[in-house]
Amino acid sequence: MVAIEGLGRLLAEHPFFKDMQPDVRDIVVGCCANAHYRPGEFLFKEGGQADHFYLIREGSVAVEVHAPGRPGVVVENIGEGDIIGWSWLVEPYRWTFDARATDQVRAITIDGACLRRKIEANHELGYELYRRFIPIMGRRIAEARLRIVELTVDPYAG
């Protein structure tokens, strides 16, 4: 029980969950686990089963996209106090990017399948999660689009 109480406290302290009603937030705790990643270690890889999302407690994660015949390009860096991973919300539940630790990362990993079951049983939880995820998704899509444009513009043209 101590581990769950500790995870509940960590969840309550993270900006993503901080202002969520405690009784709703507490439903999530049973889907959580602590995680640690070394520099260079992948949290997930493009095309893999998207079965978690991550609350970054410490460290940073590079979000990378790949093009044929080219090395991965970092489109975003995610740091302490942020989240990464929303593909667990949308079928077919596959990652569309790679996520690699750029230094030591401590995170809370939240099981997406567990959470989807709990959302089905508690629509208030679903509302609260979607209300938090949608603005992040919109912002990150816009930022990724700008980063891709930056990467494709030839600084020597015209």
Image (cartoon, rainbow, N blue to C red):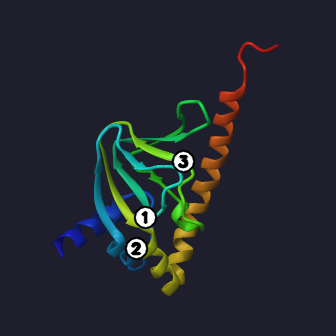
Q: Where residue 149 is drawn, which disc sits there?
A: none
Q: Position of residue 22 (x, y in %)?
A: 38, 75
Instruction: Tell me, yes or no, whether the two marked residues, 1 and 2, touch with CB atoms within 8 Å.
Output: yes
Per the image, label 1 sits on a secondary structure element best described as: loop
Residue to which mark 3 is pinned: 97
Under mark 1, the amino acid is Phe
Q: CA distance from mark 1 to mark 2?
A: 7 Å
Q: Residue at x 38, y 36 (%)?
A: 102
Classed neighbour count for the residue bearing mark 3: other residues with Cα under 10 Å, few (<14), some (14–19), many (≥20): many
**Is disc 3 placed on a helix, strand or loop?**
loop
Q: Position of residue 78 (x, y in %)?
A: 46, 44
> Mark 3 and mark 2: span between their CA atoms?
28 Å
For label 1, the crowd category at 10 Å Cα-Cα, with few meaning under 14, some 14 to 19 and many 20 or more, is some
Percent coordinates x, y for residue 12 in the rendering: 35, 65
Occupied quadrant, residue 54: bottom left
- Which residue in the protein does label 2 denote? 25
Looking at the image, is mark 1 or mark 3 nearer the viewer? 3
Compared with residue 101, is residue 118 higher up or lower down, i.e. above or below?
below
The residue at 57%/38% (across/down) is 66
The kind of residue on which mark 2 rests is Arg
The residue beneath circle 1 is 17
The residue shown at (61%, 61%) is 134
Residue nearest the viewer, comparing 43 with 135: 43
Q: What is the quadrant of the C terminus in the image? A: top right
Q: Secondary structure at mark 2?
A: helix
Quarter that holds the N terminus: bottom left
